[in-house]
Amino acid sequence: MKLITFEGIEGVGKSTQINLVLDWLKTKGFSTKLLREPGSTIFGEKIRELLLSKDSNISAHTELLLMFAARSEMIKEHLMDSREDFILCDRYFHASIAYQGYGRKLSLDLINLLINSVNCPIPDLTIIYDLDVKAGFKRKTNDVIDRIESSGINFFEDVRKGYQQLAKERSEVEIVDASESIECISQQTKLLVERLI
Ligand code: TMP
């Protein structure tokens, strides 16, 4: 099984790219599974609702720990002993480093400790779609803004810097310029995925 995860701030076009690569892998005859974080299990989807609800007045630590509670269930249910050729996951632990670490300013050591303690498998490939924060939000004008999306421009500037830093530091991470056309981004995405085939 190859695990590919997709990351980026709001409005980078992550979902579009995931669906394009998923269809492409299916037409090549590979078995695939699509997951999202937080979520992908019954328990994880309940946690997702809590995390994204504007009624949840929670601390940054609670936010981080809930992300890992959902993640732990997803790993147990979907990643351990998986028989799929490819698992594609819409966000994973890199999001905790970018959002809770760089965005909320929680300890990166604590986050790395959680990553190790929960035994998070390291993805074979993590693609970060990089885009100017304001350009990302402009693309999302029709959507209802959730609790995390309401965190402000400065927060998302820090999250973006976190993702850029991850691309420098971690060997599984590749960064793709999300200001290009959908077709061009898809082409680059497929070239990266092709290396795993
Ligand atoms: P999305 O997957 O629909 O973009 O929504 C998930 C939100 O949760 C998004 O704002 C990013 C955020 N998030 C974190 O803050 N930390 C995490 O570890 C994960 C997986 C997501």
Image (cartoon, helix red, strand yellow):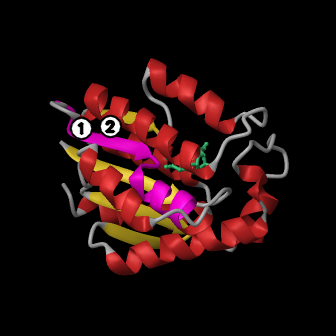
Name which quarter of the figure residue 145 lies in.
top right
Q: Which mark is residue 30?
A: 1
Disc 2 target residue: 26
Q: Quick one: 26 or 6, which is closer to the camera?
A: 6
Marks 2 & 1, CB-CB < 8 Å contact: yes
Residue drawn at x 32%, y 65% is 192
**Type of the residue with mark 1:** Phe
**Type of the residue with mark 2:** Lys
Would residue 52 be seen by someone viewing this image from the given angle? yes
The stretch in magenta equals 83-101
- Horizontal side of residue 154 vs 182, given as left or right: right
Residue drawn at x 31%, y 72% is 170
Residue drawn at x 42%, y 35% is 69
Q: Residue furthest bottom?
A: 168
- Tell whether position 138 is magenta: no
Q: Is mark 1 within 8 Å of ligand 1?
A: no
Residue 115 screen position, x and y as percent: 32, 52
The total of numbered circles placed on residues is 2
Q: Which mark is residue 153?
A: none
Q: Quick one: 47 or 110, which is closer to the camera?
A: 110
Q: Quick one: 22 or 114, which is closer to the camera?
A: 114
- Tell whether position 84 is magenta: yes
Residue drawn at x 67%, y 41% is 58
